[in-house]
């Protein structure tokens, strides 16, 4: 890797691999579902040949994919794939420390560490709750005096309202909520993967078809018509039985339920840490802003500072920026 070439950051998740240059000149998001195939090594090799970066900073969240028997083996697979493509890559762990693969004493310290990069950059100059709502999950990271205060594992964060396993695209409606109300009747939600939050957000105009980067529940289209058909199925109906207004009502209830969950978690963390400011990032910035408003908190969206493309891949951009500063120190 050339010293004069750009510094890049890579965020490798279970569903998406994100890449960003520290100078913001290139931003990419690749849908690479680790549980379905193993073409991550090839994809990284292609990136390396095409980009030829100077320095590479990496954060990992894909180790939880159920193709791996445990987190350590998941991390090792990803590290091996990265090192083969980008020799000398630097990995940020869940304590905010960079190491290359030869000097990592605990592989598990790299697991689910992308929030650390984001929170370190977003909270560098202000106390805040950094919130990143992506396709699959929502990270809520309290930051005070530039120091992220979240638990250092997903398990700990799940128990501290710092990780909600809900996202803008991939969340199964049946996992999100148990009932849908239509015409004064409470309908129990079918326990199947009939529809996802991406369908509700597409119908509501919160995302565009090109934002719907993951597979749909039925493998069919990413149009409003296809999304409506899938949403009707969550109450065991179809678009002949339900009017369009009914399906839009379903979409609205899904969105509000997710917003209220996020708002509740924000309120808890705000009270615990005495923080009144939220910094929002990710595909779900609109959801973050709405949830913060309902919690009575001030919200700043990172897209206004960095642009929407960077906001959607913020962990990758953040680790690139942190590595640039690390090299300059």
Image (cartoon, rainbow, N blue to C red):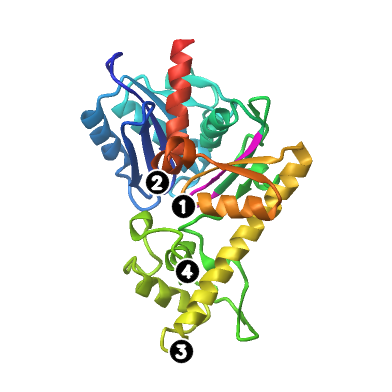
The residue at 48%/35% (across/down) is 305
Rendered image: mark on residue 16: 2
Answer with mark 3 or mark 1, whichever residue precedes in sequence.
1
Label 2 neighbourhood size at 10 Å, few (<14), some (14-19), many (20+)?
Answer: many
Q: Is the magenta stretch mostly helix, strand or loop?
A: strand
Q: In which quarter of the image is residue 226?
A: bottom left
Which numbered disc, 1 or 4, marks the residue that appears first in the sequence?
A: 1
Distance between the alpha carbons at the discs numbered 4 and 2: 20 Å
Residue 161's place in the image compared with 3, above or below, is below
Marks 2 and 3, the one that precedes in the sequence: 2
Name the N-terminal-most of marks 4 and 2: 2
Q: Which mark is residue 135?
A: 1
Q: Of helix, strand and loop, which one carries label 3? A: loop
Q: Residue at x 61, y 58 (%)?
A: 259
- Contact (Cβ within 8 Å) of mark 2 with mark 1: yes
User: Taking 200 as reference, is 106 above or below it?
Assistant: above
- Estimate the spatial distance between the alpha carbons at disc 2 and disc 1, rounded to whole Å: 9 Å
Quick one: SS at disc 2?
A: strand
Q: How many labels does the image show?
A: 4
**Residue 1 in magenta stretch:** no
| Quadrant showing the N terminus | top left
Q: Mark 4 points at which residue?
A: 193
Q: Which of 262 and 157 is in front in this view?
A: 262
Which label is found at residue 241? 3
Q: State the extent of the magenta-drawn residues as a range.
A: 128-137
The residue lying toward the viewer, choosing from 258 and 152, is 258
Q: Give the image location of residue 266, x and y in percent.
A: 68, 48
């Amino acid at each position: 890797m050339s010293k004069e070439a750009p510094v890049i950051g890579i965020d490798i998740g279970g569903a998406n691999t994100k890449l960003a240059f520290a100078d913001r000149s290139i931003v990419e998001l690749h849908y690479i579902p680790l549980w379905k195939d193993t073409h991550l090594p090839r994809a990284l090799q292609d990136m390396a040949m095409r980009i030829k970066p100077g320095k590479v900073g990496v954060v990992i969240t894909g180790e939880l994919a159920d193709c791996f028997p445990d987190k350590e083996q998941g991390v090792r697979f990803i590290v091996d794939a990265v090192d083969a493509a980008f020799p000398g890559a630097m990995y940020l762990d869940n304590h905010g420390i960079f190491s290359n693969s030869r000097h990592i004493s605990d592989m598990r310290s790299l697991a689910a560490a992308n929030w650390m990069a984001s929170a370190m950059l977003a909270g560098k100059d202000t106390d805040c709750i950094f919130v990143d709502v992506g396709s699959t999950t929502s990270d809520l990271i309290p930051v005070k005096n530039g120091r992220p205060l979240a638990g250092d594992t997903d398990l700990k964060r799940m128990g501290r309202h710092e990780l909600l396993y809900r996202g803008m695209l991939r969340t199964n409606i049946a996992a999100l909520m148990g009932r849908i109300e239509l015409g004064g009747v409470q309908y129990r939600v079918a326990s199947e993967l009939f529809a996802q939050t991406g369908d509700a957000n597409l119908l509501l105009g919160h995302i565009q078809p090109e934002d719907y980067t993951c597979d749909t529940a039925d493998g069919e289209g990413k149009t409003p018509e296809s999304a409506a058909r899938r949403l009707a199925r969550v109450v065991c109906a179809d678009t002949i039985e339900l009017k369009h207004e009914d399906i839009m009502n379903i979409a609205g209830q899904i969105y509000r339920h997710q917003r209220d969950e996020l708002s509740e978690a924000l309120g808890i963390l705000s009270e615990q840490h005495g923080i009144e400011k939220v910094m929002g990032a990710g595909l779900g910035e609109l959801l973050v802003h709405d949830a913060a408003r309902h919690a009575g908190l001030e919200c700043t969206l990172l897209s206004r500072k960095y642009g929407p493309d960077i906001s959607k891949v913020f962990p990758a951009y953040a680790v690139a920026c942190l590595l640039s500063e690390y090299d300059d120190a």
